[in-house]
Image: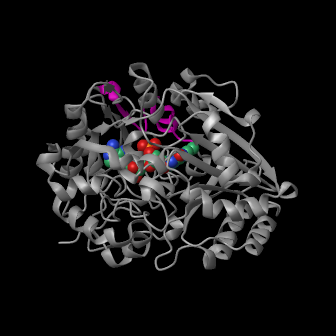
Amino acid sequence: VVPSLASSHGFLQCLSAAIPKPLLHTQSSPSFTSVLVSSIRNPRLFTPSTVRPLCIVTAINASHVQAAVVCGRRHDVRIRVRSGGHDYEGLSFRSERPEVFAVVDLANLRSVRVNGKAATATVESGATVGELYYAISKVSDRLAFPAGLCPTIGLGGHLSGGGFGMLLRKYGVAADHVLDATLVDANGKLMDKQAMGRDVFWALRGGGGESFGIVLSWKVKLVAVPPKLTMFRVPRSVDEGAVDMLTKWQEIAPALPEDLFIRVVVSKQVAEFQSMYLGTCDTLLPLMRGRFPELRLNRAHCREMTWIQSVPYIYLDSTATVEDILNRTTSMDTFNKATSDFVHRAIARDVWVKIFAWLVKPDAGIMIMDPYGGQIGSLPESATPFPHRAGVLYNIQYMNFWSADTDGSAQTRWLKDFYAFMAPYVSKNPREAYVNYRDLDLGRNVVVGNVTSYTAAKVWGDKYYKGNFKRLAMAKGKVDPHDYFRNEQSIPPLH
Ligand code: FDA
């Protein structure tokens, strides 16, 4: 059903009755554009032709979220929910096709409570991972949370899609550590883990955002880290042996002790090895000499620091402080597009030579590779919807960037062509992908008779969720049988 002008009007009236005026930003409000762009990072997702919401509700409590859902159902206006706004395709604030919809923005629902004794935290979806990390560090230097690197990612979307960072080999994905959640369902009802039931609670922890309702808050288990750990960043060019190092890295990085994580960012001729080791430089050096002597790591590379100091060290520039991870301001300067792969069998040396030839082409992008193995691979694929577990050597993220003076066609073409080139060397049947690195080129939903088609969605669903896709669709059928919460890649309901 396409909402008519009358239903939009009825929707807005319904909202006005339940939500204070300053929290309701319609297209004609002076605040509309600044609220809309507040967490957008990628100008590709905000152009003159972007389909904008009818209004944005900047909720400050659960009743505002519930009212938005109740009004939306009554007047046939769909809702998209936004926490940190970091969705790679902007699905939390824009629609690909002309559609009348509203955004419920949770950026103001961002409290974080840490219980150091119990090693848990209760965190609202609009908090960023940086805010969670900071709050943990204020309570203890021996506790941490195993989530992503970028401090401005919102917990709402991040936990919904899995979420991983430098602790993934030791502790798996962020969603593996969710103990409870509060959800507003398609009837506007507030539910906890017990009320929503086993299958829906399972689905929330990695089944992708938007599909099951609006998660307001999460209770998570924190993990132990030593008071001092060792970081390093070592760049090696092709001339310095990067081809041989990468060839070897693929086999050793996923098999190292869980305390040692070495990722690689490859750009042009240079592979930068970025590492977190849950121990001191004194124990790291002999380990590296034994397992990966080719990297020639020495004491001068070691940076000993606390876990919280490692966050700005790895993601922000070298002058950044721990307080900088609280900065939610995002800038919209570089356009980008990304996609992902999972590798199960090491890529041969001669192929790495060809990969470097791709990376030095004009308009080339970069590769970011995170090694798996350890804890992430020890859970069964069905433990949470995130299925990329045993047998995965590493994850690849391909990303390309451009600025406003080009239209990005050369850069997106490079990404597509390089992705096609990589097909023989990565996972097959399905070619796996990570939902938090969302890519609409993997497939878009088709709506048949006002319900998202399961068969059409399987094309992208199998890539993100493998054998878990059907169970996700059954959970969707239980909690949102009429398919109210939907977007271009939401889970279709199965009954
Ligand atoms: P956003 O608010 O855009 O939401 C993403 C999706 O979830 C949307 O479909 C939205 O509707 C839905 N959603 C949001 N809040 C919800 C809620 N409360 N309830 C239900 N659905 C909700 N990933 C990673 O694993 N490790 C990493 O290191 C990084 N690094 C990184 C850096 C940068 C610069 C970006 C832009 C992204 C990453 N990511 C990442 C990817 C990130 O995990 C992913 O984009 C998350 O979905 C972002 O969550 P937000 O809440 O910020 O997004």
> Is 426 above or below relative to 396?
below
Most foreground residue, 206 or 127: 206
Given the current orientation, which residue lies at the most extreme right position?
Answer: 239
Residue 28: within the magenta? yes
The magenta segment is 21-41
Q: Position of residue 111 (x, y in %)?
A: 33, 26
Q: Residue at x 53, y 74 (%)?
A: 427
The number of callouts visible is 0
Q: Position of residue 323 (x, y in %)?
A: 54, 21
Q: Position of residue 442 (x, y in %)?
A: 50, 70
Left or right: 434 as drawn, with respect to 44: left
> Is 188 above or below relative to 127?
below
Q: Is residue 134 visible?
A: yes
Q: Residue at x 28, y 46 (%)?
A: 214
Most foreground residue, 489 or 446: 489
Of the 4 image quadrants, the one containing the C terminus is bottom left
Left or right: 215 as drawn, with respect to 390: left
Left or right: 222 as drawn, with respect to 130: left
Residue 196: within the magenta? no
Q: Position of residue 257 (x, y in %)?
A: 52, 51
